[in-house]
Image: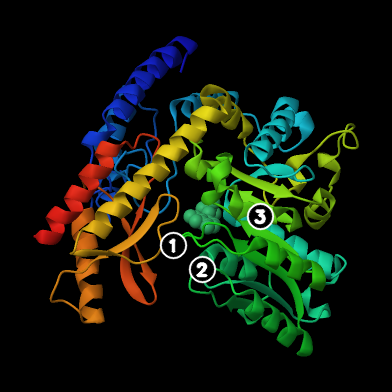
Amino acid sequence: MTPEEFRRHAHAMVDWMADFLDGVEQHPVRAQTRPGEIAARLPESPPDMGEAMETIFADFQRDVMPGITHWQHPRFFAYFPANSSPPSVLAEMLTATLGAQCMLWQTSPAATEMETRVLDWLRQMVGMPRGFTGVIQDSASSAILAAILTAREKATGWGVNAEGLKAHPPMAVYTSEQTHSATEKNVKIAGLGLAGFRKIPVDDAFRLRVDSLEAAIEADLAAGIRPVCVVASIGGTGVGAVDPLRAIGELCRRYDIFLHVDAAWAGSALICPEHRWMFDGIELADSVVFNPHKWLLTNFDCSAHYVKDPDALIRTFSILPEFLKSREADAVIDYRDWGVPLGRRFRALKLWFVIRSYGVEGLRAIIREHVRLGGLFAAWVEADPDFEIMAPPMLSLINFRFHPSGVDDPADLDRLNEALLHRINDDGRIYLTQNRVGGRYVIRMSIGQTRTEQRHVEEGWAVIRELAAG
Ligand code: PLP
């Protein structure tokens, strides 16, 4: 492709992108294709000769687009958002164009230095104290893994790295019943085994019970098991559970246990001072993660991971073959040893574009509007005799179910709501996901897409009621 052809195709695609985003509401939110339908449209073997970009792009529109679920759709109310924004997309275009692999300071000093600076901006934005140093990970899952590995190594004096797990007594990781599945997955990856994974019960407000945590720690110590890490949730995935950080942090200090805070979704809301109560005690944490790629208008992937003791993290991951040595290593940060992958994208650029383009106040206004819309939606559900709220609404996350009069058997209600959810998502006008609260099947409404306005939430509520009535 010549530079002139590249320019022509890029202009055409940017026009397509602008039109697509402008008209994204016209698409079904969740892809309506059946398993294998897209694969059947793709040739079984690669082309021997290059094809024209016009053909490739036309095939993209015809064969690929129907299989896309539209996370940038303003009526996307499923999971948590993975929202994007025009400034973030522009930065991603530049990042792709530069194609820099930013594993070392020397392999793009600007990427490293901007990452350090922008993550410190973000630290200030969410009101975290000085003393936390940030790094961008690809996901909250990777940050949790980094935390558990660091905890394991600190507890064994970097002994597992040296001698392997067999040389050490068994270890345990603690978290609440409301934790994201990533914690359990990472306990397995870290080699601690599910035998070392403790799901601590929660209280009526879904908060980890500190008395139960202490009892579990004591029981493990008595059994010769070393407690190494607690993962606390701030805004858990199911109902947005907020664990009592200060009490957990004090307990961790007392027992010398590493504390990681998973605020993957809710952390972004802390740019609004009125939500900072959730971080009371954050100074007691050893590491913290939240995802600007969820609720801060920054394209996936971008997880902000903060650590109190970067040396412990680096020592856990560090490995230095000859080809990675550099003259400046003592004077600069080389992010290659702050996580699992060696190679790194220039992810700070999109965050820099977003924060500068919206300003902190602009971002706050968007989060506040989503929270306001969450409150409105919860009020509509509460006021409707055929629906009920199933857990206290949290920020913009609402768990509810359809409960028409005359249907009271719990299993019938589960079946009814499951059928309703499938019906809603097959309809395509909105997209929601499910949850279990107290063992019961519930529908989960999460508001946070960049383009979501009140009319979209009103339309969503109308669709839910229409399909429930049917
Ligand atoms: N923690 C919480 C509370 C989450 O909600 C999620 C994802 O939704 C994760 C962790 C995992 O995030 P990631 O996809 O960045 O690994």
| Residue drawn 51% across the image and 60% down it | 236
| Residue drawn 25% across the image and 80% down it | 410
- What residue is disc 3 on? 280
**Res 323 quadrant in image:** top right
Q: Residues within 10 Å of mark 2 (few under 14, many from 20)?
A: many
Instruction: Specify whether 427 is left or right of 43.
Output: left
| Residue drawn 29% across the image and 38% down it | 454
**Is 248 rendered above or below residue 350?**
below
**Is 17 rendered above or below residue 36?**
above
Checking the image for residue 239, the label placed there is: 1
Disc 1 marks which amino acid?
Val
Query: Quick one: SS at disc 2?
Result: loop
Identify which residue, 367 or 436, lies in the foreground. Answer: 367
Identify which residue, 424 or 339, lies in the foreground. Answer: 424
Instruction: Specify whether 222 is left or right of 407.
Output: right
Q: Nearer the viewer, mark 1 or mark 3?
A: 3
Dots 1, 2 in contact, CB < 8 A: yes
- Label 1 to label 3: alpha-carbon separation: 20 Å
- Label 1 to label 2: alpha-carbon separation: 8 Å
| Residue drawn 49% across the image and 45% down it | 294
Identify which residue, 213 or 226, lies in the foreground. Answer: 213
Q: Residues within 10 Å of mark 1 (few under 14, many from 20)?
A: many
Checking the image for residue 178, the label placed there is: 2
Disc 2 marks which amino acid?
Gln
Whichever of callouts 3 and 2 sits on the residue coming sooner in the sequence is 2
